Every structure is written in C-alpha cells, then in structure tokens.
C-alpha cells in the first residue's frame, strides 16, 4: 500500500465526480444513452469517466491491472496481483433520470481483496473512503456499521414499497447504486443489503472495504468470502449486514433460493 499516494487517488475520484456532475447538472445525462444489454443502460458520461479514470489511475500505478464495467471486455490486465476495479458511474439509471443515487466507485484490489475504496457521490455531496485495516469515513466522519442483532425488523434499502406481511423488514430509501446501499450499512442507515443475482465485482469492491472496515459483514449471497480481480469479473450476489444478523440472513437467502430453484 505504500506504493500509492492515496490522497492523489481521492483527488482523481473527485475530478471524475466533477466530470460526471457537469453532465448531471446540465440535465443532459439522458440525451446520449443506449442499452449495452437488455435492461443495462450506459451513458456517454459513463464512457468519458471510464476513459479519464483509466488514464489517470494507470499513471499512478502502471503495474496494476484494470477491471471496469465499461471496459470489461478488455481482460488483458485483469488477474494480476494488484488491479483497479472500477465502476465509472454506479447507479446509471438514477444518473440519467436526474436523481442523486449514483457514485463513482474505485477500488484497489491486492491478492483478491480490496485494500482501498472510494465512492464519490457528488449529487449527494458525499465522499466515502476506506483503507483496509485502518480507516473508513464519509466526508471525514468515521463510520460505525449497524449493530442490529435481530433479523426481523431490519432496515433494507427498498424505497417506498409494500412488502408481504411474511417479510418482516423495514424498507428505507434505495439509491440505484448498490455501492451506496452497502455504504448505508456502513453508516448505520440500513442493516441489510442483499442481491441473489449474478453481479459484477466493480459494483461492490469499493463499498466492500468501506462497509467491512466499519464493522459490517460482506459476503456473496451464500455467505462465502468474496474474491476480486478474477478474469470474469462476476460474483454470485452480495450480502452486506450487521455482524449480528449475518447468519440469519444467510439462512433466509438459502431458503429463498431453495424455494425458487429453477424459476427465471
């Protein structure tokens, strides 16, 4: 970790956030968008931020690999001992709708684990930063994750929805960015975030170290350790919870998956 000037990386993240923010504030974020796959949209701003980050981060650590949502097809630099794992705009759907729940997500991964993470969320006026083993903060304020020890009644980012009575959870505000949802657990704004679909490492790598350093548990949907910077960039879901409800959440997810096996 001594090879990297982390203050410079934070400054680069803020420049990237400013680049995206100019498009967002101008109301032009929805003008140049397209579907890269069914239901998966990308904007011109995603591409511009990705290009900016790749150039600037490579200059800081030329030997590191690169794994990003918008250049995921380029596997030539993935799989190295160190790599940048980046989502130039996590939460693109909120970004193009002019809503605030998006962030620039940057993680530095070493030997399969994130050692440094930044979420730059300029529309929310928040900068989240964490170093593995030493520090996690939002806007300079240290983070302490949810300490909830009872699953029923747990806060989960779902927005304004009516849950079935058998699901005894408490919906709270849901940003489109899953990284920001994990950060909510880190800051005791939520107790539980879960996804049971195949997802991408760049969505969660930075938020993983932010939440874990705050005391949250972060695993895949089966409760197993997440490893990063593989050649495929995929993980089966994510589960981020307070330490006290993680085992119960793993059991609930397992039950859900068993009951829904074979369903699309």
Image: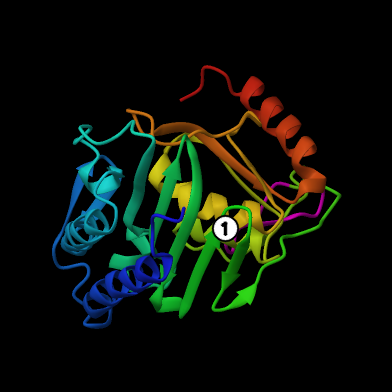
On the question of residue 158 being in view, the answer is no
Q: Decide which of 12, 223 is in the foreground and name it.
A: 12
Q: Check residue 185 for magenta coloring.
A: no
Quadrant location, the C terminus: top left
Q: How is the image coloured?
A: rainbow
Outermost residue toward the right in this view:
150
Q: Tell me where residue 108 appears, x and y as whole percent.
A: 41, 50
Query: Residue, x 46% and y 35% (percent of image)?
Result: 111
Start-end of magenta stretch: 152-164
Q: Residues within 10 Å of mark 1 (few under 14, many from 20)?
A: many
Above or below, comparing residue 77 to residue 93 in the picture: above
From the viewer's perspective, tell me whether residue 71 is left or right of residue 216: left
Query: Residue, x 79% and y 45% (percent of image)?
Result: 245
Occupied quadrant, residue 187: bottom right
From the viewer's perspective, tell me whether residue 165 is left or right of residue 27: right
Outermost residue toward the top in this view:
262
* Residue bearing mark 1: 210
From the viewer's perspective, tell me whether residue 220 is left or right of residue 247: left
Q: Tell me where residue 51 appears, x and y as whole percent.
A: 17, 57
């Amino acid at each position: 970790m001594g090879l990297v000037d982390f203050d410079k990386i934070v400054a680069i993240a803020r420049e990237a956030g400013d680049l995206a923010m100019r498009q967002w504030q101008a109301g032009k974020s929805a003008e140049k968008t397209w579907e890269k796959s069914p239901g998966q949209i990308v904007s011109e701003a995603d591409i511009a931020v990705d290009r900016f980050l790749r150039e600037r981060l490579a200059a800081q650590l030329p030997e590191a690999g690169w794994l990003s949502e918008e250049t995921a097809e380029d596997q030539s630099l993935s799989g190295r001992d160190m790599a940048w794992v980046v989502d130039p705009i996590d939460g693109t759907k909120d970004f193009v709708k002019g809503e605030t729940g998006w962030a620039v997500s940057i993680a530095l991964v070493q030997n399969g684990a994130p050692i440094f993470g930044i979420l730059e969320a300029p529309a929310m006026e928040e900068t989240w930063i964490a170093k593995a083993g030493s520090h996690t903060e939002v806007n300079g304020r240290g983070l302490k994750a949810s300490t909830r020890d009872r699953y029923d009644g747990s806060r989960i980012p779902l927005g304004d929805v009516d849950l079935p009575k058998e699901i005894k959870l408490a919906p709270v505000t849901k940003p489109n960015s899953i990284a920001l949802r994990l950060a909510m657990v880190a800051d005791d704004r939520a107790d539980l975030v879960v996804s049971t679909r195949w997802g991408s490492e760049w969505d969660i790598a930075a938020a993983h170290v932010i939440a874990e350093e705050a005391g949250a548990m972060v695993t895949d949907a089966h409760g197993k350790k997440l490893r990063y910077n593989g050649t495929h960039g995929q993980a089966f879901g994510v589960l981020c919870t307070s330490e006290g409800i993680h085992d119960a959440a793993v059991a609930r997810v397992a039950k859900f998956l068993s009951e829904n096996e074979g369903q699309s």
